[in-house]
Amino acid sequence: NAGVMQNPRHLVRRRGQEARLRCSPMKGHSHVYWYRQLPEEGLKFMVYLQKENIIDESGMPKERFSAEFPKEGPSILRIQQVVRGDSAAYFCASSQGSVGPHEQFFGPGTRLTVL
Amino acid sequence: DQQVKQNSPSLSVQEGRISILNCDYTNSMFDYFLWYKKYPAEGPTFLISISSIKDKNEDGRFTVFLNKSAKHLSLHIVPSQPGDSAVYFCAASGDTGANSKLTFGKGITLSVRP
């Protein structure tokens, strides 16, 4: 059973470009969470999605960031007009459900560097 | 406002000894507490969790203790092994739905000396 897949693993963008980060959850998991880790910091929650629905986006910056989890295909985190402050590691996690023990399984992360 | 705090940035222990990693929280609405282990350039790996209705959970070499009145939990690793050297994150969440998101501490770097 493959784990959570994220691609690309490394992404370099120039200021003003768009970044698209993809996440394929574990088989059988329908809940996806995105977290961001800035240097020397812990992981910060960004958004929680189920298939075709955004459940909680309270951690997402109000502008330039968006996320989706379509009926078919991976979850996408999109950052428009990237700035240097967006440089971070972005982790996706998936779980079977949101009730009970919350064992979220994490992908390897995408390391975004904005030049 | 940091709701989950890991106040010690690092810990060094001798192989075979006990490692005790501490975590404090401020939000009394948290229902679950989890520990994750992370190696450089990898995603966090789930280690062990505990429900707020329990005070102890054990899994092999790993034991988590929860003191609700003090809003404090700790992870004990016995015996410590060099392969345990990593960053350990304490995390907490509510019960259902939107409360299932994880709130992380900043992490503790554990070094186990051979």
Image (tube, rainbow, N blue to C red):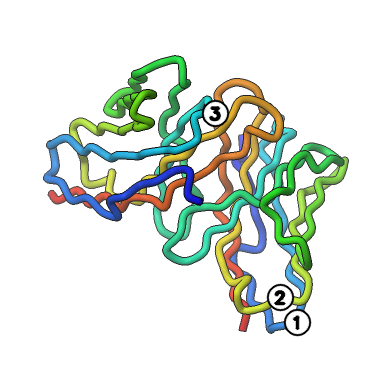
What residue is shown at x 48% (from left), y 43% (from top)?
B3
Viewer-proximal residue, B31 or A49?
B31
Report how far apart the C-alphas of labels 1 and 3 lie in the structure: 40 Å
What is the crowding at mark 2: few (fewer than 14 residues within 10 Å), some, or many (at least 20)? many
Instruction: Report, in whole angstroms, how far the alpha carbon at label 1 lies from the one at label 2.
Output: 5 Å
Helix, strand or loop at label 3? It is: loop
**Residue, disc 3:** B29
Percent position of residue B7, x then y: 31, 50
* Residue drawn 60% across the image and 58% down it: A90
In this picture, is B24 found above or below B8? above
Q: Position of residue A11 (x, y in %)?
A: 64, 71
Q: What element carries label 2?
A: loop
Q: Residues within 10 Å of mark 1 (few under 14, many from 20)?
A: some
Q: What element carries label 1?
A: loop
Q: Could you tell me how many numbered marks the image carries?
A: 3
Residue on which the image places disc 1: A16
Chain to which the residue tagged by mark 1 belongs: A
Q: What residue type is labelled 2?
A: Val
User: Which quadrant of the figure has residue A111?
Assistant: bottom right
Whether tag 1 and tag 2 are in contact, CB under 8 A, the answer is yes
Which residue is identified by label 2?
A: A82
